[in-house]
Image (spheres, rainbow, N blue to C red):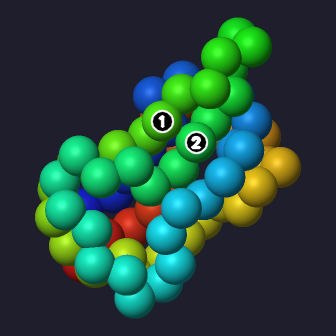
Amino acid sequence: MSDITAPMGGKVIDVKVSVGDSVSENDEVVIIEAMKMELPVVATASGTVKEIKCKAGDAVEADAVMIVLE
């Protein structure tokens, strides 16, 4: 299993995957707004989305787990 974490604190603008989706390394999975910039968060490994721990509008802290891959 692999966790995708927030690189910095911010607000979740969009979650681009759903549970069960297959993702490849470097695929965009979440968009965060931080310091008035949109920051794409990419998958750190290939796998299947097992769990999504955030939704659009959520505030996230740096290093918070947003998506779990298996």
Asked which secondary structure carries label 1, the reply is strand
Whole-number angstrom distance, CA of label 1 to CA of label 2: 5 Å
Q: How many marks?
A: 2
Using residue 34 as the reference point, say whether residue 41 is left or right of it: left
Is 56 in front, or is 51? 56
Q: Residue at image x 69%, y 28%?
A: 33
Residue most toward the top? 35
Asked which secondary structure carries label 2, the reply is strand
Is 38 in front, or is 69? 38
Is 29 in front, or is 53? 29
Type of the residue with mark 2: Ile
Type of the residue with mark 1: Pro
Mark 1 and mark 2 in contact? Answer it, CB < 8 Å. yes
Query: Which mark, by number, is residue 40?
Result: 1
**Residue 5 appearing in the image:** yes
Q: Residue at image x 52%, y 78%?
A: 18
Residue 57: % across, % down: 83, 49
Q: Which residue is mark 2?
A: 31
Q: Residue at image x 60%, y 59%?
A: 15
Quarter holding the N terminus? bottom left
Q: Quadrant of residue 53?
A: bottom right
Residue most toward the bottom? 20
Quarter holding the C terminus? bottom left
From this view, report whether residue 69 is shown above or below residue 50: above
